[in-house]
């Protein structure tokens, strides 16, 4: 499910300045099949297909919360389609995971700037009504201080970060070809010192998301 962009600024717990730029490794990229097989250069319909195939909800076994994701609309003239989907529920053995995908639906290649975990640099999500915070730990952790961050098992039904989230003071860029997708998976944890997996809606947003370019983000709702 997608939604119109929110103008509420995301209150990040920590911020770092971009000190340099590196290219995103090829492991993030995958090529989608052209929407029109008779014309490989025609990406018409690709945007709708990306959104149709985006799984935005997932049930978790008791006592863990279910996930529901709602992401902002992207202007058609941005030339990209976004998908934020649930890929793994909370269980006794593993925390939940989401995937953020950016697909180039234009007819030309484009280069975008990101944070340390493309295609999404918003590593925190704040509860919209209560004092609770989620963090997103990317699978690609070359520039993230993740040692000891993710626990081996849940404790009393709680998946909480075991240390503070930290990252290198850099930015990453990616050149995305037509019909190409950059995808990364992120483990969801309650932030260290935060209430654990409090039910309700959490907001993750970047005030200026380069591919859009404008404010863009998504909501994650945890529910019984």
Image (cartoon, grey):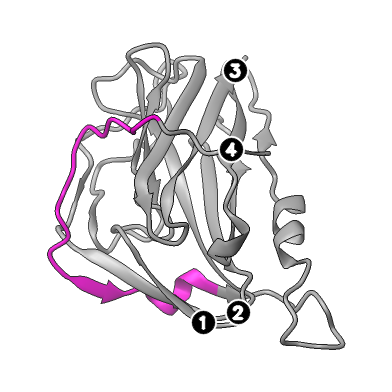
Within the image, what quadrant is residue 140 found in? Answer: bottom left
Quick one: label 2, few (<14), some, or many (20+) residues within 10 Å?
many
Q: Residue furthest top?
A: 130
Camera-nearest label, 4 or 1: 4
Q: Quadrant of the C terminus?
A: top right
User: Disc 4 vs disc 2: Cβ atoms closer than 8 Å?
Assistant: no
> Badge 1 is on which residue?
109
Of the image marks 2 and 1, the number of the one nearer the N terminus: 1
Residue at 68% across, 29% down: 59
User: Disc 2 vs disc 1: Cβ atoms closer than 8 Å?
Assistant: yes
Of the image marks 1 and 3, the number of the one nearer the N terminus: 1
How far apart are the two marked residues, 1 and 3, measured between alpha carbons?
40 Å
> Badge 3 is on which residue?
223
> Badge 2 is on which residue?
178
Q: Is residue 16 magenta?
A: yes
| Span highlighted in magenta in the image | 8-29
Camera-nearest label, 4 or 3: 4
């Amino acid at each position: 499910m997608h939604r119109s962009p929110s103008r509420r600024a995301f209150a990040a717990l920590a911020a770092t300045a971009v000190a340099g730029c590196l290219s995103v490794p090829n492991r993030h990229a995958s090529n989608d099949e052209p929407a029109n097989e008779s014309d490989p250069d025609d990406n018409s319909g690709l945007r709708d297909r990306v959104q149709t195939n985006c799984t935005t909800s997932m049930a978790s076994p008791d006592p863990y919360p279910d996930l529901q994701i709602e992401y902002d609309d992207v202007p058609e003239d941005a030339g990209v389609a976004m998908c934020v989907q649930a890929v793994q529920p909370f269980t006794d053995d593993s925390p939940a995971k989401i995937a953020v995908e950016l697909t180039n639906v234009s007819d030309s290649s484009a280069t975008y700037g990101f944070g340390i975990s493309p295609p999404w640099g918003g590593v925190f999500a704040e509860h919209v009504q209560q004092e609770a915070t989620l963090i997103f730990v990317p699978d690609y952790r070359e520039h993230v201080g993740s040692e000891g961050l993710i626990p081996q098992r849940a404790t009393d039904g709680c998946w909480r970060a075991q240390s503070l989230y930290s990252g290198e003071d850099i930015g990453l860029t990616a050149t995305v070809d037509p019909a190409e997708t950059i995808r990364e998976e992120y483990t969801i944890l309650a932030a260290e010192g935060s209430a654990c997996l409090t039910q309700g809606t959490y907001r993750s947003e970047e005030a200026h998301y380069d591919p859009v370019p404008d404010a863009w983000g998504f909501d994650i709702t945890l529910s019984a």
